[in-house]
Image: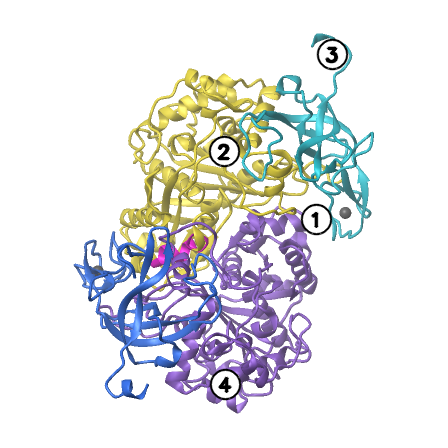
Chain colours: A cyan, B blue, C purple, D yellow
Amino acid sequence: MSQTATPAIEGWFTTGPAPALVGSRCTTCATVFFPRTGGFCRNPACSGEEFEGIELSRRGRIWSYTDAQYQPPPPYIPATDPYVPFALAAVELPEGLVVLGQVAGGYGVADLEVGAEAELVVETLYTDDTGDRTIWRWKPVIEMGQEADQ
Amino acid sequence: MSQTATPAIEGWFTTGPAPALVGSRCTTCATVFFPRTGGFCRNPACSGEEFEGIELSRRGRIWSYTDAQYQPPPPYIPATDPYVPFALAAVELPEGLVVLGQVAGGYGVADLEVGAEAELVVETLYTDDTGDRTIWRWKPVIEMGQEADQ
Amino acid sequence: MSNDVAVAGVGMHPWGKWGKNFVEYGVHAARAALADSGIDWQDVGLVVGGETVRNGYGGYVAGATFAQALGWNGASVATSYAACATGAQAIDTARARILAGMCDVALVVGADTTPKGFLAPNAGERWDDPDWLRFRLLGMTNPAYFALYARRRMDLYGATQADFAQVKVKNARHGLNNPNARYRKLVSAEDVLASAIVSDPLHLLDICATSDGAAAVVLTSLDYARKRGLTNPVRVRAVSTVTPTFPNTVMDMPNLSTDSSAVAGVPERTFKESIAHAAYEEAGIGPEEVSLAEVYDLSTALELDWIEDLALCKRGEAETLLRAGDTTLGGRIPVNPSGGLACFGEAVPAQALAQVCEVTWQLRGQAVGRQVENAKVGITANQGLFGHGSSVLLSV
Amino acid sequence: MSNDVAVAGVGMHPWGKWGKNFVEYGVHAARAALADSGIDWQDVGLVVGGETVRNGYGGYVAGATFAQALGWNGASVATSYAACATGAQAIDTARARILAGMCDVALVVGADTTPKGFLAPNAGERWDDPDWLRFRLLGMTNPAYFALYARRRMDLYGATQADFAQVKVKNARHGLNNPNARYRKLVSAEDVLASAIVSDPLHLLDICATSDGAAAVVLTSLDYARKRGLTNPVRVRAVSTVTPTFPNTVMDMPNLSTDSSAVAGVPERTFKESIAHAAYEEAGIGPEEVSLAEVYDLSTALELDWIEDLALCKRGEAETLLRAGDTTLGGRIPVNPSGGLACFGEAVPAQALAQVCEVTWQLRGQAVGRQVENAKVGITANQGLFGHGSSVLLSV
Ligand SMILES: [Zn+2]
Ligand SMILES: [Zn+2]
């Protein structure tokens, strides 16, 4: 990531040293939403209309995973030519929701398992005339002992 | 129209000295359709499934008319730049149907009247890399006496 | 068996260009209608969305999109599309499920954002699609179709461009105080006649604009309404969604030709006449009982056509009504007391629902600043591309 | 009150790439269904079209397009859209109007032409549309969602890629003699496992192709059927079109996240379980009475999910059924006797109707070469984008 890196979408995640997804929490019922929401609460049992922004937990458990062996169609913007496949994971966070993401560079489906831990990182998704455009990604958390196996 | 002129749409009209729209007539109930149809008869009281091609009458009565003062959006292809407005007419044919068309070049709404006669001509709609592309148009039939007035 | 259902609530998002997306507009209208009805979202058993074809996949499945945005409540869902008749189709779908006993409460929502300028077909070459061919072969825009109908009124019935302008003047006055209208400004006949000709004989101000907007209606069974203490609700008495009868002899957008009447003969009623006829038949109510009408004034001249199609006067006499002030607020049969499309602009899947909202407010006596006195029966009418018309008849 | 309606006729245009437009396909299927029913087109009181969003304006208003192509008969019209659940929604719309006494005979038609390759969103930038964002931000295609579900089966229940391949082998055998199927060729497990991985763990042959195709159903009231001498017709016993209940905790195409269950708690049933549950409840028929199921095998592994969602076995046991041959023709509960999407390919608005056609042929004993013996009850299931599922339950 270059100095000029900017998120590929605004306001969905922070980019500091401990990056996190940014969601909304209903101030009435405390239900958390990602992506952020506004207006009124989508919990149909709640009539709340106020939300506060919150950073979601940076670690969760892998709900499932896969990869993209073929280049996805537009509006996907490939990072490289020729295309290099990447992995994808759905990760369940302590806030009770599952969030999709690409898997961090260098990791593939062989590094993943349902129930295993993953941590959020921010990496470059593609580069355009404004520079690198970044995105949140899920990076497998390699536990002691596992690492030695690899 | 150049020598290489071809219809802007295939099979909808003839291009000889007495051009005409080409429709279909159901061989069972004799109902006429334009544009051409196939498969089966759209007269719901008829179960016919055979059609013969026919040339429609070249003259009919103006059902209504208007013009296009602003350039229509694509897929319309303007013939000239800057745009020149043109007139449009719906003409009722002796076969019992009304057919829309542009009005022949040089005529405008002032030359038209509901109930007046119009005749089919073939003129250039636009030009592309294959040459002139032609279309049917309605030309007001100026009767004796009227002509002198103009 | 009565086909009546109750209108328990109505709501809108004001028309205009607000820069929001269609979901926000629709949810605003839905919540307004629910609030008006006093019914909780969790008690809604069916959500019917009016589809918008210009807002990505979420627009194609508008019913589910609104249901999700309101917070999944497990309701059944449906999405209807019928061009400008979409809202009425959606009401018909909701009504049928209520009458079949499949749900008690249905929420019907339509919302749109609409681009500026001529409505144009999707990109790509489609040589078997009349909606594409009419542009490619003829340059035939929507206003050009409206202009054909307007010209016929002039040449056959002696209508004038000043008459058309007068429709605009009337509707602008009607909508002046309508909080949901986009344009709230008096217009003079001179203004209309001084505006540019778009398609002769229609001026720019004869033709309705496009707009963003949303409208929603909460329908319930009469039993459910009664249980909730709604003893005399506005009722939907009829919804007409008929197609033409062959041969369809009136040039219909986006076609390039009509059917031939040479063999099958001319039908007893034109398509637009048959739309209203079906509504009157179903309701068992005649045009002479109608207190007001909301009709689809895509152009000023079309309002005059509709007045006749609804049998509010004989063919060719709409100008007489107009000139006598009969169709103005305070007149015998006010037409478009809301201000109509002239004041709202067109927001396709919301429009037929907006008509029903207006009639409901009128029949409840809540149409502040534009109330038709003693309104008992209201009828709506509109027409979309490809043989879609609709008419909804309501009464108290 | 019974919610039953009669299936008076069914028909298809064979699936495949025939180079025709969707109207021709749909009209072919409609006329086949009318011929099968012996009912004249002029007696149809309602036409419901399953919309196709890839065929210009005529596809958006499919109901009217088919009605016009068949020859305007003055019927009422409706057009439904709900992604892959479109056909079932259209049936529900038709059924409601029949049950409400608004018409006796309804014709329901779906037809599509489908481009090759990944289904991709419309052009343009839409930063508030999840269907656009999932491609832009994640490169998340439809098969990638299917693959997430497949992988969970492997990691949670011990499914293998060989199991998935076996689903394809079975369905290929089922469809071998189905005259409406596009692919009629035996496939071996080795063929599947040797085909390229698209999204791990799914191979190319695990994922259904797209196709052109059309299907139509003629529905009537039971009274009308009786009057026409149809004494023991196949009946639609239930149509489920429910939406999820908050929180929807299973990752759903095209979303990037699920709802949070932290506050509202995990619902009693997942969304897909609730779809079938609603159908069983409405029909008053339990899963143990089902003779066969037609389920939406967008991927081989998804068929296994559906078997459990339909409660044909407990969660995690579908592979056991598969391995025992229970879901094969001749087994305890044949699944996709038609050959399923594996043999047909996907033609969105036609697919749920095609399932109903197959169940009807099975319940009539007319499924030559693929007949489930003594079939009495059949259920269909599918799911579209954005919280659309559907299930139709039929019986003799
Ligand atoms: Zn809340
Ligand atoms: Zn015929």
- Identify the residue shown where x is 58% and y is 83%: C170
Tell me where residue D18 sits by quadrant.
top left
The foreground one among A52 and C217 is A52
Dominant SS type (magenta): helix
Q: Which residue is mark 4?
A: C163
Q: Secondary structure at mark 3?
A: helix
Q: Secondary structure at mark 1?
A: loop
Whether labels 1 and 2 share one chain? no
Whether labels 3 and 1 share one chain? yes
Left/right placement of residue D41 relative to residue C358 reads left
The foreground one among D164 and D5 is D164
Question: Does the stretch in magenta take in D67?
Answer: yes
Q: Which residue is mark 2?
A: D287
Question: Does the stretch in magenta take in C113?
Answer: no
Measuring from the top left, give residue B42's x and y in whole percent: 27, 59
Decide if residue D180 is in sight here: yes
Looking at the rendered structure, the kind of residue marked 2 is Pro
Q: CA distance from mark 1 to mark 4?
A: 51 Å
Looking at the rendered structure, the kind of residue marked 4 is Asp
The label shown at residue A147 is 3
